[in-house]
Amino acid sequence: MAFFATRLISKEVRELDDKDLDELLASLTVEELEQLSNEVDPDDSLLPPSQRCKDQTKKSPTGPLNRKKLLDYLERTAREQADWPEAKPYEAGLKRGKIWKPKEVPKTKTDDLEIELDLDDEYEQALGTADETELVDLAAILGLHSMLNQDQFHASILNKGQKIGDRFESIVHATKPKVLPLEPDNDTDVDKTLDQVCNNVASLKKLNWNNIRNISREKMKRLFEGLKTNAHLEYLSLANTDLYDVSAE
């Protein structure tokens, strides 16, 4: 085998023809040929990797394979086998190895310089006495859209007689939505107002059952039956009450 490796190193494989390869293989012994066949994969790409290497086990089988006994033996051996000795004993909460730390990015120093504008007294007095609407219009004319919200920007354009969307080149701030309190639960007494509708009570002009859940179909049916003879109810609200088409019909 050493002779074969030496010949290959001294001469590149691509420079060897079939005749030279035959001579090299003919000069190998049986042991070298067997070693070569074990190290070289077969020329078959469709062959599974588990079958590309030849069986190198030279021992004869001791008996037929019993899968259950083999698994029991492996589990028993794993339980009885002692753990490998550790170089360092385990300690709870102790971190081993190098702890990763993020790289410190140098902070860029920014010098806060106060910019002083030398304005004429006339301009300074005009800006000092200007109200919010005039300042918004001035910012829109100068193109300082980032100082305005959407409502102020569109209002400034409309005041100048321009079309909405003209000169809208910079990012503007969106108007913050108004925070409104949650509406309280509807505390209307369903049974009481239902009896008033059926009895045609004159004081009941408006009936609001909005957002009242779990109103049974029988009560809905009684309500519509009472509306047929009621002559005083003017407004009826039944939003978000799980009203079915069958009850309404």
Image: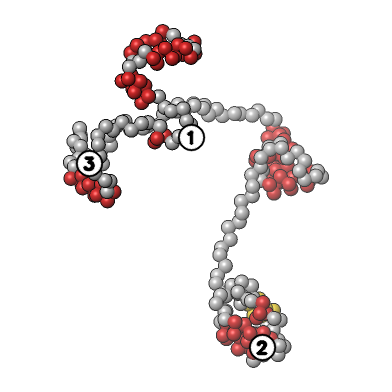
Count neighbours of disc 2 (C-alpha within 10 A) and say few if under 14, some if 14 to 19, many if 20 or more.
some
Report x, y in % for residue 109.
49, 26
Query: Which is nearer the N-term, disc 2 or disc 1?
Result: 1
Compared with 197, 80 (above or below) is above
In the rendered image, the quadrant that contains the C terminus is: bottom right
Q: Secondary structure at mark 2?
A: helix
Instruction: Name the amino acid type tagged 2.
Output: Gly
Compared with 225, 178 (above or below) is above
The residue lying at 64 percent from left, 49 percent from top is 175
Disc 2/disc 1 C-alpha distance (Å):
83 Å
Report x, y in % for residue 193.
60, 84
The residue lying at 37 percent from left, 31 percent from top is 53
Q: Which residue is mark 1?
A: 46
Query: Is 107 or 142 nearer to us in this picture?
Result: 107
In the image, farthest residue toward the top: 10
Quarter location, residue 80 = top left
Q: How is the image coloured?
A: secondary structure
Q: How many marks?
A: 3
Q: Secondary structure at mark 1?
A: loop
In the rendered image, the quadrant that contains the N terminus is: top left
Disc 1/disc 3 C-alpha distance (Å):
33 Å
Q: Which residue is mark 2?
A: 226
Query: Which is nearer the N-term, disc 1 or disc 3?
Result: 1
Q: Is residue 71 visible?
A: no
Q: Which residue is mark 3?
A: 62
Instruction: Name the amino acid type tagged 1.
Output: Leu
Q: Is 39 situated left or right of 94 in this image?
A: right
